[in-house]
Image (spheres, rainbow, N blue to C red):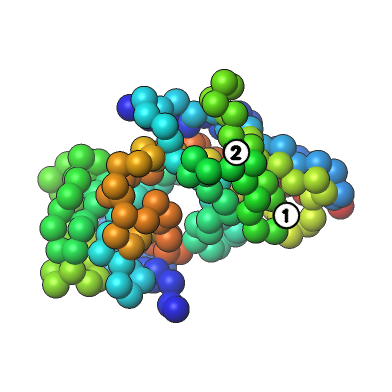
Amino acid sequence: AQSVTQLGSHVSVSEGALVLLRCNYSSSVPPYLFWYVQYPNQGLQLLLKYTSAATLVKGINGFEAEFKKSETSFHLTKPSAHMSDAAEYFCAVSKGNSGGYQKVTFGTGTKLQVIP
Amino acid sequence: EAGVTQFPSHSVIEKGQTVTLRCDPISGHDNLYWYRRVMGKEIKFLLHFVKESKQDESGMPNNRFLAERTGGTYSTLKVQPAELEDSGVYFCASSRGTEETQYFGPGTRLLVL
């Protein structure tokens, strides 16, 4: 079984401040981990993914995440928030190395508000 | 390359009516997934097609939901009869072969009154 916990359903940061969105996962096998973003009135867009290569993963729009096995975490960070980062962010996990055909388990989402 | 498309973008129906949602995956993607997000909850897996075959339908809520993917191209998800608790956003996603990344469509927002 696999699960994802996102701490904080709402996070507010000032423009220019560090963005830190927390995600912890549970998986019985080495996981694949993802962060998706949903901008208002749009679909889910892949920000970045971890698939057992480098533990520090860089994504689009200046975001990155670090896979920490010992902490079962995959927190999302961005050094300096921009107004356009306001969106809802979803952490997700799937079973790695299962040859595809794998369902993704999502966290409950974190809405990021950026204050001017 | 066109992304995953879903139709309609919004649907408002009354309890007891039937609604059919459509998903067109990215061309060449054999895998097609349906997910649902009920308001305030997490996005949950409904089912997975590989081409025209249902690979995993463990997330389908009940027999009021019927998904098809005739010919292995687009898919439809029918809800009949719709209940209030079926309201939410229905997402479709697709992926190639054994690729781990799923590409999501914009979703269909369903409201059952």
Label 1 or label 2, whichever lies nearer to me, is: 2
Residue A20, x across and y down, in percent: 72, 37
Q: Amino acid at mark 2?
A: Thr
How many other residues sit within 10 Å of disc 2, few (<14), some (14-19) or many (≥20)? some
- Which amino acid type corresponds to the residue marked 1 in the rendered image? Gly
Residue A103 shows up from this direction: yes
Please state which of residues B76 and B18 is positioned toward the viewer in this rendering.
B76
Q: Which residue is mark 2?
A: A55
Where is residue B35 drawn, in percent x and y? Answer: 34, 50
Q: Which residue is mark 1?
A: A62
Whole-angstrom CA distance, mark 1 to mark 2, is: 16 Å
Discs 1 and 2 carry the same chain letter? yes
Which residue is more in the foreground, B40 or B83? B40
Q: Secondary structure at mark 1?
A: helix
**Mark 1 belongs to chain:** A
Q: Is residue A3 left or right of residue A79?
A: left
Q: Is residue B95 left or right of residue A80?
A: left
